[in-house]
Image (cartoon, rainbow, N blue to C red):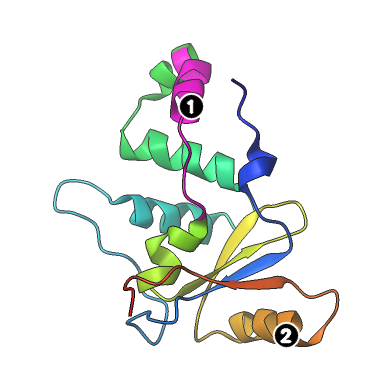
């Protein structure tokens, strides 16, 4: 089964931090003692490469880095790794810890490429205002809540 990036990605959409986000500004996720967490890897990739990755590309890159798959293994088995990874469904970034717990808004541009913005930034507020007041503004969604309350 071929992976279809378009079926799991947004375009012209801004994901606001969760309504129960515990922080008041964007913070860098902490890593584990011996490895990086998936949300830290997401943060590093998106903060260092705004609008480089679609959601599918991001999931793949995070997987490679989290599992510490070597470049030679990627070159030899990259398509197989990709097929195996995308044989299962993956949650969208509304479920990521970046907007749920760490205070980062997630913007998908018209091509579905992603960038993150700290919740206290002017750019974050501009996305929210554009989504609320302009017909051509981004669709606004909230990240998923961490609790049911």
Give the SS element for disc 1. Answer: loop
Specify whether residue 53 is in view.
no
Pick the residue in front: 33 or 97: 97
Q: Which x, y percent locates residue 26?
A: 42, 77
Dot 1 corresponds to which residue?
A: 87
Q: Residue at x 47, y 43 (%)?
A: 90
| Badge 2: residue crowd in 10 Å (few <14, some 14–19, many ≥20) | some
Confirm or deny contact between disc 1 and disc 2 (CB under 8 A).
no
Q: Which x, y percent locates residue 24?
A: 39, 87
> What is the span of residues highlighted in magenta in the rendered image?
77-92
Residue 28 lies in magenta, yes or no? Answer: no
Which quarter of the image is occupied by the C terminus? bottom left
Give the SS element for disc 2. Answer: helix
Q: Which x, y percent locates residue 21?
A: 38, 79
Which quarter of the image is occupied by the N terminus? top right
Q: Tell me the distance, in whole angstroms, between the alpha carbons under discs 1 and 2.
A: 37 Å
Dot 2 corresponds to which residue?
A: 132
Position of residue 33 in the picture relative to residue 8 (left or right): left
Position of residue 59 in the picture relative to residue 107 (left or right): left
Q: Which residue is the extreme one toward the front?
A: 149
| Badge 1: residue crowd in 10 Å (few <14, some 14–19, many ≥20) | few
Residue 86 lies in magenta, yes or no? Answer: yes
Q: Which residue is the extreme one toward the left?
A: 33
Q: Residue at x 66, y 53 (%)?
A: 113
Q: Which mark is residue 45?
A: none
Question: Quadrant location of residue 57?
Answer: top right
Question: Quadrant location of residue 148?
Answer: bottom left
Q: Is residue 128 above or below residue 96?
A: below
Q: Residue at x 50, y 86 (%)?
A: 120
């Amino acid at each position: 089964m071929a992976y279809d990036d378009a079926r799991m990605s947004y375009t012209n959409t801004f994901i606001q931090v969760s309504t129960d986000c515990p922080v008041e500004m964007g913070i860098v996720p902490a890593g584990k003692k011996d490895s990086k967490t998936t949300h830290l890897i997401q943060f590093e990739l998106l903060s260092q490469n705004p609008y480089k990755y679609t959601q599918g590309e991001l999931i793949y890159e995070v997987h490679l880095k989290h599992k510490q798959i070597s470049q030679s293994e990627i070159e030899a088995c990259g398509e197989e790794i990709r097929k195996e990874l995308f044989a299962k469904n993956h949650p969208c970034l509304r479920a990521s810890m970046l907007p749920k717990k760490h205070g980062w808004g997630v913007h998908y541009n018209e091509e579905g490429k992603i960038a993150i913005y700290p919740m206290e930034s002017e750019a974050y507020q501009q996305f929210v205002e554009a989504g609320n007041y302009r017909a051509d503004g981004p669709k606004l969604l909230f990240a998923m809540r961490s609790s049911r309350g």
